[in-house]
């Protein structure tokens, strides 16, 4: 039976070569695209779950002075957590914020991904050690553990343990005591080196220095950990605050110390805190791409069903004869399902190579790696097989039952009508183009929002501004370095500050007017007198800082939001914080992502700063200036490499999640449209074959090419218009929900919907016209010869 069905299925594939090629190609693209998205979704949703006991690991984040919350928390918290019975082991560690020089056998490498960890780190997180013992490392301050990748880079195929390397500009000697296997699993703990750390003595509860993670004992719960943290607040943090209020009142106020518990498995996708270990994932992107993956495979399945049922008049005679000869309906259903399974299996074999090609193509086009690997372990091929089996069942079920439902008597008498079949096919075309048009609308809205975010007036001019992030490392030479840069003809101005918009540092202080009963915590930018002109900020009232006025050392400049926050009716000249005078008001400016409203800001005067902003006249000579900058930096500091960035690129990085979403949605929408176009092409081919004699007669009676094309395409265009009317409200609702997450957003314009429908219609016309023109220019004599 199996052998017979295989032979019949193979013969049908060969007999209808064109149909088979189009169907397999459409299924291949559908399976490959959906499988890539499935693996991406799997990778994102299972991030960090390859660690043993991941469900018992938690991170403790903190907030104090209402600063918005930090992924890091207090060093002293690590010491106190170990005292509680629910905690099996606690670890505190930090990550490197800049590349560090590593010298191995006189060769120097710069390594950006490294952690400094305590002796408990590898007791909490289970890494696979190729060399060394995880229970015996990090017990002395000169130990280092390397990834397999770095161990091979430094020492080739020789054992790495026991060898020494020199770290940092001080060339501190470290002994390699372990090598960890390369890992393709997704994790937010991205590192290639783990160096031993001695935790600094710090008993402050208002200083967040380390990432604190705990592994709970078997049976312990998150609520138990919460009770332990509440007890720490009461016994240690509350007395440290020296508050005159009762504990419950102090705890409830915004400026108190707070702890937040994050399940380890949720950190990558759902962490809302500042200064996280690595860039977090985007749950919206995961779910959106997951839905697109479902849409793509549905479009591919619809193609198969459409083409199979369209050929029903051809297969009907085969079914009629077989039924007359005694074939049972059950055996015919199995045969048709077997054909679908064979076609799906062939598509699966091709899709493996296509999927790998799509991943590489996406990386080449966008510069972003969508998935680390498609086939991480034995589970992925099994998932692919199950996925293809489900698709085969989904695609083959209706055609199998439909084709075997024909009455052999009506078939052989020529009384069979397929009007219902045509209506069903029309419904499927509407369905798949509803999905396709919806995706086009989503793509246009995402890109329109991204363009709005890029070009929105941020309250200052970000173009041509270079930020030297570690200018403070020059120490006493920083001012001389600044003056050297300012003397260059292409430099408009330079400014020192402790932070810049879209930067990685946060400064917040409490401010209070004489009329206020409680102080409010406000974002603060300590900067010199050149900060405002260098960034092109707008002074609305008062004046800028002046280095000539000693009184400006206690002056402040507020943005409009800060004026409202402090309830100042006549802000210029107002006193805040017992002696700090407001000398000017600047317009509100964005310094965070577009997801957040502009916050109150206070500019305080500071002659020195760790960051140096350099405003250039334009970006046409940037490469030459950067070369000069690097050379000049080395003459001032030969030990620490210069770190710089462009201010506009820093803002672009804040929207990286949205940009990645835009790239991914566009990429897979194009694939969805391609699959839909393949199905429409095949359906048009079949329609032309069925109407070839009608077209021949019309041409003899005087019909021109344009009228023939209109005849063939008008029914499909009507269906696409219907699909557009269905897609419009659904897409509007979905994208309006997505835009609600932005404090500053576009209004969804009507022209986006018209453009989406137009794109779909043009794609359909281009697809249909290929076969329509071929039919229209064919010799009608050949069409009618067999009549």
Image (cartoon, rainbow, N blue to C red):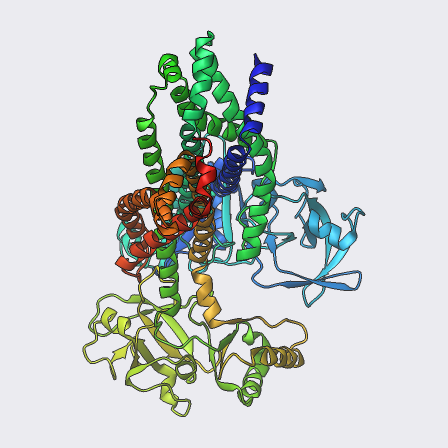
Residue 757 visible to an observer of this rendering: yes
Quarter of the view holding residue 481: bottom right
- Residue lying at the far bottom in this picture: please name it: 548
**Compared with residue 485, is residue 165 higher up or lower down, i.e. above or below?**
above
Counting from the top left corner in percent of width and height, residue 698 is at: 35, 42
Report the residue at 65% width, 77% height from top: 637
| Residue situated in front as seen by the camera: 93 or 502 | 502
| Residue situated in front as seen by the camera: 330 or 573 | 330
| Residue situated in front as seen by the camera: 120 or 605 | 605
**Compared with residue 495, is residue 453 higher up or lower down, i.e. above or below?**
above
Q: Quadrant of the C terminus?
A: top left
Classify residue 724 as left or right of residue 303.
Answer: left
Q: How many marks?
A: 0
- Residue lying at the far top in this picture: please name it: 326
Report the residue at 34% width, 82% height from top: 555
Counting from the top left corner in percent of width and height, residue 721 is at: 29, 46
Classify residue 344 as left or right of residue 193.
Answer: left
Counting from the top left corner in percent of width and height, residue 484 is at: 57, 87
**Compared with residue 147, is residue 548 higher up or lower down, i.e. above or below?**
below
Residue 442 visible to an observer of this rendering: no
Quarter of the view holding residue 418: top left
Report the residue at 48% width, 78% height from top: 464
| Residue situated in front as seen by the camera: 359 or 540 | 359
Counting from the top left corner in percent of width and height, residue 479 is at: 54, 84
Q: Quadrant of the N terminus?
A: top right
């Amino acid at each position: 039976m199996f052998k017979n069905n295989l032979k019949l299925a193979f013969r049908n594939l060969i007999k209808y070569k064109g149909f088979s090629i189009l169907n397999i190609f459409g299924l291949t693209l559908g399976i490959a695209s959906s499988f890539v998205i499935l693996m991406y979704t799997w990778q994102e949703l299972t991030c960090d779950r390859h660690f043993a006991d991941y469900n018992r690991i938690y991170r403790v984040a903190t907030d104090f002075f209402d600063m918005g919350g930090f992924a890091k928390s207090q060093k002293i918290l690590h010491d106190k957590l170990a005292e509680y019975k629910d905690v099996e082991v606690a670890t505190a560690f930090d990550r490197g914020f800049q590349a560090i020089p590593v010298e191995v056998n006189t060769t120097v490498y710069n390594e950006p991904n490294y952690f400094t960890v305590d002796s408990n780190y590898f007791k909490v997180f289970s890494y696979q050690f190729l060399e060394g013992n995880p229970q015996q490392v990090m017990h002395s301050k000169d130990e280092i553990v390397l990834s397999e990748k770095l161990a091979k880079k430094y020492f080739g195929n020789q054992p790495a343990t026991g060898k020494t390397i020199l770290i940092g500009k001080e060339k501190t000697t470290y002994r390699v005591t372990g090598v960890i296997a390369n890992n393709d699993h997704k994790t937010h703990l991205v590192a290639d080196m783990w160096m031993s750390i001695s935790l600094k003595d710090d008993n402050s509860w208002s200083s967040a220095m380390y990432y604190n993670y705990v592994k709970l004992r078997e049976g312990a719960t998150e609520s138990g950990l919460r009770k332990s943290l509440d007890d720490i607040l009461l016994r240690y943090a509350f007395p440290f605050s020296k508050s005159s209020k009762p504990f419950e009142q102090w705890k409830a106020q915004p400026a108190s110390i707070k702890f937040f518990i994050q399940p380890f498995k949720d950190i990558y996708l759902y962490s809302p805190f500042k200064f996280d270990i690595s860039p977090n994932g985007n749950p919206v992107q995961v779910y959106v791409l997951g839905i697109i993956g479902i849409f793509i495979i549905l479009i591919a399945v619809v193609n198969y069903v459409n083409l199979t049922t369209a050929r029903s008049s051809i297969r009907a005679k085969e079914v009629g004869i077989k039924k007359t000869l005694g074939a049972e309906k059950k055996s015919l259903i199995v045969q048709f399902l077997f054909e679908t399974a064979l076609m799906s299996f062939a598509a699966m074999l091709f899709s493996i190579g296509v999927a790998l090609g799509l991943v590489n193509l996406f990386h080449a086009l966008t510069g972003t790696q969508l998935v680390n690997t498609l086939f991480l372990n034995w589970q992925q091929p099994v998932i692919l097989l199950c996925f293809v089996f489900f698709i085969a069942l989904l695609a083959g079920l209706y055609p199998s039952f439909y084709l075997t439902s024909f009455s052999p008597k009506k078939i052989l008498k020529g009384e069979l009508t397929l009007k219902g079949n045509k209506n069903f096919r029309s419904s499927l075309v509407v369905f798949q183009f509803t999905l396709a048009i919806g995706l086009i609308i989503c793509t246009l809205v995402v890109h329109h929002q991204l363009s709005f975010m890029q070009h929105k007036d941020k309250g200052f001019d970000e173009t041509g501004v270079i930020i030297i992030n570690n200018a403070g490392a020059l120490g006493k030479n920083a001012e001389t370095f600044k003056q050297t840069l300012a003397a260059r003809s292409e430099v408009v101005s330079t400014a020192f500050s402790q932070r810049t918009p879209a930067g990685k540092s946060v400064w917040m202080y409490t401010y209070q007017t004489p009329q206020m009963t409680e102080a409010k915590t406000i974002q603060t930018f300590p900067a010199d007198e050149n900060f405002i002109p260098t960034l092109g900020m707008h002074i609305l009232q008062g004046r800028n800082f002046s280095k000539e006025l000693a009184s400006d050392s206690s002056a402040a400049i507020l943005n409009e939001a800060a004026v409202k926050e402090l309830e100042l009716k006549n802000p210029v000249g107002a006193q805040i914080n017992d002696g700090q005078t407001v000398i000017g008001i600047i317009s509100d400016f964005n310094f965070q992502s577009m997801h957040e409203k502009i916050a109150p800001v206070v500019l305080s005067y500071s002659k020195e700063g760790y960051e140096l902003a350099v405003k250039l006249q334009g970006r046409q000579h940037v490469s030459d200036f950067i070369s000069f900058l690097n050379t000049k930096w080395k003459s001032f500091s030969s030990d620490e490499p210069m770190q710089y960035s462009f201010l506009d690129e820093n803002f672009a990085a804040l929207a990286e999640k949205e940009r990645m979403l835009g790239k991914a949605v566009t990429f897979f929408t194009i694939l969805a449209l391609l699959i839909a176009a393949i199905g429409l092409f095949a359906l048009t081919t079949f329609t032309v074959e069925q109407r070839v004699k009608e077209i021949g007669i019309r041409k003899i009676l005087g019909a021109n090419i344009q009228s023939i094309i209109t005849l063939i395409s008008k029914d499909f265009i009507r269906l696409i218009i219907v699909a557009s009317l269905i897609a419009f409200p659904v897409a509007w609702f979905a994208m309006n929900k997505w835009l609600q997450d932005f404090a500053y957003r576009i209004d969804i314009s009507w022209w986006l919907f018209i453009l989406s429908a137009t794109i779909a219609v043009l794609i359909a016309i281009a697809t249909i016209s290929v076969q329509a023109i071929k039919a229209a220019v064919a010799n009608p004599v050949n069409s009618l010869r067999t009549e």
